[in-house]
Amino acid sequence: MKIVFEGGEGELVEKKSRFIATVRPVEREEEALAFLAEMKKKYWNASHNCFAYVIGANQELQRCSDDGEPQGTAGRPMLDVLLGEDIHNAAVVVTRYFGGTLLGTGGLVRAYSKSVQTGLAASKVIEKKAGKLVRVRIDYNGIGKIQYLLGQRGLQVVDSQYTDVAEIETLVPLEQAGELIEAITEGTNGRAGFLKEEEVCFGFVDGEPLIFH
């Protein structure tokens, strides 16, 4: 699933109305409500502070508000963007400063939707996967084969240690783990030893591995 690792802020102007989208990761509804209160305090003089948030592994908790905009023109379109991007555990507040020109129903829907997309683009959104942290022990003759098998599957070496033998660690999606272990065993004629096969959730931030505990 996709999560917001680091929130961000985006801004756009439509017919002199200013829209500021602030995105933040949240794991509980209390956090989302505290974030909303914080934004309302920060932008106390704004025309509207509309919000949407989605929480849970299955996006089971979904809330949104138009905050005085015509019904269905702000909160729901904002929530639809989060759901459409398959974002989990995130909240977004779009603050509007009215510029004097009415946008109409369609204009508002487009402006609030685009604002959320702008906010997400300014945030760090990563894919969080269920997988295994696999540590393999192999003699030096087998290193090349293991590196080849990992590269073939688009997997990275996340840690390595070289003494009289080599130990290589990789993160592999859960559905690929069994096949990878079998391929390594076969490719090294059974010489590889598996020191660790730990189930974890992981992602990559700017190319660097991140394990969620």
Image (cartoon, rainbow, N blue to C red):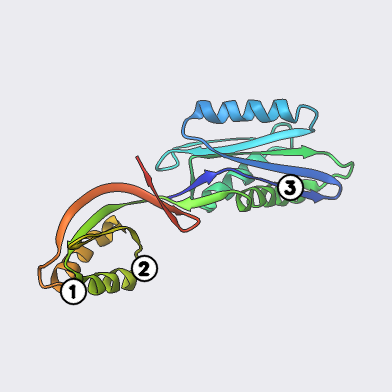
Front residue of 189 and 132: 189
Q: Position of residue 207 (x, y in %)?
A: 46, 58
Total residue callouts: 3
Front residue of 56 and 74: 56
Image point (30%, 68%), residue name = 150
- Left/right of residue 40 with respect to residue 142 in the rendered view: right
Question: Secondary structure under badge 3?
Answer: strand
Query: Is residue 73 visible to us here?
Result: no
Can you name the residue that lies furthest to the front here? 164
Asked if the residue under mark 2 is in contact with the one under mark 1, i.e. CB atoms within 8 Å, the reply is no
Quadrant for residue 94, please give it.
top right
* Residue position marked by numbered label 2 in the rendering: 154
Query: Is residue 58 visible to us here?
Result: yes
Asked if the residue under mark 2 is in contact with the one under mark 3, i.e. CB atoms within 8 Å, the reply is no
Dot 3 amino acid type: Glu
Q: Position of residue 116 (x, y in %)?
A: 64, 47
Can you name the residue that lies furthest to the left here? 190
Q: Position of residue 28 (x, y in %)?
A: 47, 30
Image point (35%, 63%), residue name = 156
Q: Earlier in the sequence, mark 1 or mark 2?
A: 1
Question: Secondary structure under badge 1?
Answer: helix
Q: Quadrant of the C terminus?
A: top left
Cα distance, mark 3 to mark 1?
55 Å
Q: Which mark is residue 11?
A: 3
Crowd band around label 2 with a 10 angstrom C-alpha radius: few (<14), some (14–19), many (20+)? few
- Left/right of residue 70 with respect to residue 116 in the rendered view: right
- Left/right of residue 54 with respect to residue 184 in the rendered view: right
* Residue position marked by numbered label 1 in the rendering: 141
Front residue of 19 and 202: 202
Question: Secondary structure under badge 2?
Answer: loop
